[in-house]
Amino acid sequence: MRAGKLYHQAGHPALAERVGGWCRVDGNGMSGNKHIVVIGAGIVGVSAAIWLARAGLRVTLIDRNAPGQGTSFGNAGVLASCSVVPVTAPGLALKGPKLLLDPSFPLFLRWSYLPRLAPWLLRYLSHANDNDTRRISNGLTPIVSDSVEQHKALSQDTAASPYMVPSDYNFAYSDRVAFDADAYTWQLRQAAGFKPEIIEGEAVREYDPAFGPSVGLLAVMRDHGYITDPGGYVAALAETFKGMGGHFVTANVTDFDLGGGTVQAVVTDEGRFDCDNVVLCAGIWSKSLANKLGLNVPLESERGYHIVFKQPSAGPKAPAMVAAGKFVATPMDAGLRCAGIVEFGGLDAGPSKAPLRLLRQTVEETFPDLTYADSEEWLGHRPAPSDSLPLIGEIGQSGVYTAFGHHHIGLTGGPKTGRLVAGLVAGDRPNIDLSAYDPNRFH
C-alpha cells in the first residue's frame, strides 16, 4: 500500500480533504522493507502502528506492559472533541495557591514533591494568560475536534469498533451562575465550532433522571462519543495491528543507537531492534528517553484517579463532566467510571486518600440514588507538558519522532496524532501546520 494513501485506504476518501488530511510529497510511496519501531502501546502508539502498517511499512510495537494497560486503561473514555481549552486559563496563577489549600476543590499536591515540581510549575503557570490560552486552544483544536471521525477511521471493520458508542457529552453545573462563571472557556469552545444546548431546572431530570438536585443546568454537546472499555479497545486495536503482520514485543526500552547521528536501533532489556525510524509515544515515560536524544522536555505527571462503581443502580445515560468536582462520569462495560481529580506528586508515590475521598463525596452528591455492588480505585499518570501542547514531530534529524504529551486529551487525540506521525514517517506532508507541536521547541 502506498504511504500517500493513509486516508483513502481507510475507506474514508472524504477525510483526505478534512483537517489533518495529507498531500503527497514525492508520489512514490515507501518501501515495505523500511522498519519502524513504535515505543509505547497506548492509544497513540497503537494508532501510529496501525497507520504505519496501513502505509505498507514493517512495524514493531514495544511496551513493557500489554497494550492498553497504562494511562490509556484508566481514562474517562470520552471522545471529547470540544476539549480545546487548556487548564491554564487566565487567572490560574493567582487562584492556584488558594485552590490547593481548599480541601473541597479537586486539586491536590504532595507537598514533599514541591521542590522538584517548582521549575515545571512556574513554566506551566506562565501560560495562564489570555494570549497563551488562545494560542494553545488553537493548537489543540486540530488534534481533537474530529475525534469521533478519527476513531471511526482507525477502528472500522475491526474487533475494536463495537467499543465505540456515539453519544452526547454533558457538562453538569449547579445553576446558571456556575455555568456563566465558565463563560471564557465556552467562548473558546464556540470559537472552535462547539456550541452547547442548555437544559435547566427540572428539564435536567427529564433528560436524565440520574442527576440529583445538585445539578440544575446541563450544557449538552451533541455528536460526541465514548469508549465502553478503553483498555479493551486499545488491546483490540493491537490485535488488529498484529493481524496485519505487525510485531509486538514486551520489553523495557533503555537506549538508542545513534550511529552517525541518526537512529540505527532501539536497545531494550530483551535485546536490540535495528530500525530505520522510531516513534516515541510512551506518555510520561517518554521524558527520560527523550533526554537521551538531547531533548529536555518539561513534562510532569498529572496524577489522575478513577473509581468504577460496579453493577450500578443508576448513572448518567451519557458521559457527564461534573463541574463542581471536575470529574467525568461515564457508563462503561465494567460499571460507572468516575474519573478526574488533579494531583501533582510524581511517578513514585502511591495513591493518596484525600483525592479518592473527595471523588466519592462528589459522586454521591451528583447521583444521590446511586447504589452499587462494589467499587474499584485506580491511579494513572497524565503526561503534562508545561505548555499543554503535545509533541509531534522529529527530534532534530535523529530519525526519532515524538507523539506524546497529550495531558487530558490522550484518548480523544490519540488516533489523529498517530495518523499525523505515521504520515511524517512515511514521507507525507500534512495540510495543517505542525509547528505548534514541534518537539524541538524544548531544545
Image (cartoon, helix red, strand yellow):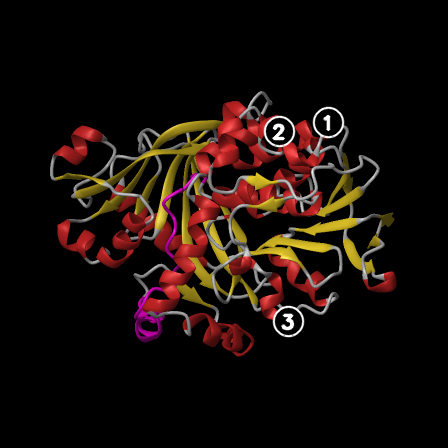
Which quadrant holds residue 404?
bottom right
Whether residue 229 is visible to the viewer of this picture, yes or no, is: no
Q: Is residue 95 magenta?
A: yes
Which one is in front in this view, the residue at disc 2 or the one at disc 3? 3
Instruction: Choose between 389 and 376: the one closer to the eye.
Output: 389
Q: Quadrant of the C terminus?
A: bottom right
Q: Earlier in the sequence, mark 2 or mark 3?
A: 2
Label 3 belongs to which residue?
A: 443
Q: Quadrant of the N terminus?
A: top right
Which one is in front in this view, the residue at disc 3 or the one at disc 1? 3
Residue 334 x/y as whole percent: 48, 31
Residue type, numbered disc 2: Ala
Tell me the CA gap for discs 2 and 3.
Answer: 36 Å
Label 1 belongs to which residue?
A: 244
Residue 130 x/y as whole percent: 32, 67
How packed mark 3 is, by other alpha carbons closer than 10 Å (few <14, some 14-19, many 20 or more), is few
Magenta stretch: helix, strand or loop mostly: loop
- Vertical position of residue 131 compared to residue 339: above or below: below
Label 2 belongs to which residue?
A: 236
Which one is in front in this view, the residue at disc 2 or the one at disc 1? 1
Total number of numbered labels?
Answer: 3
How packed mark 1 is, by other alpha carbons closer than 10 Å (few <14, some 14-19, many 20 or more), is some
Part of the protein shown in magenta = 77-102
- Vertical position of residue 358 compared to residue 202: above or below: below
- Vertical position of residue 41 compared to residue 181: above or below: above
Residue sitting at x 87%, y 63%: 260
Residue type, numbered disc 1: Met
Element on which disc 1 rests = loop
Residue sitting at x 56%, y 75%: 116
Residue 392 x/y as whole percent: 59, 54
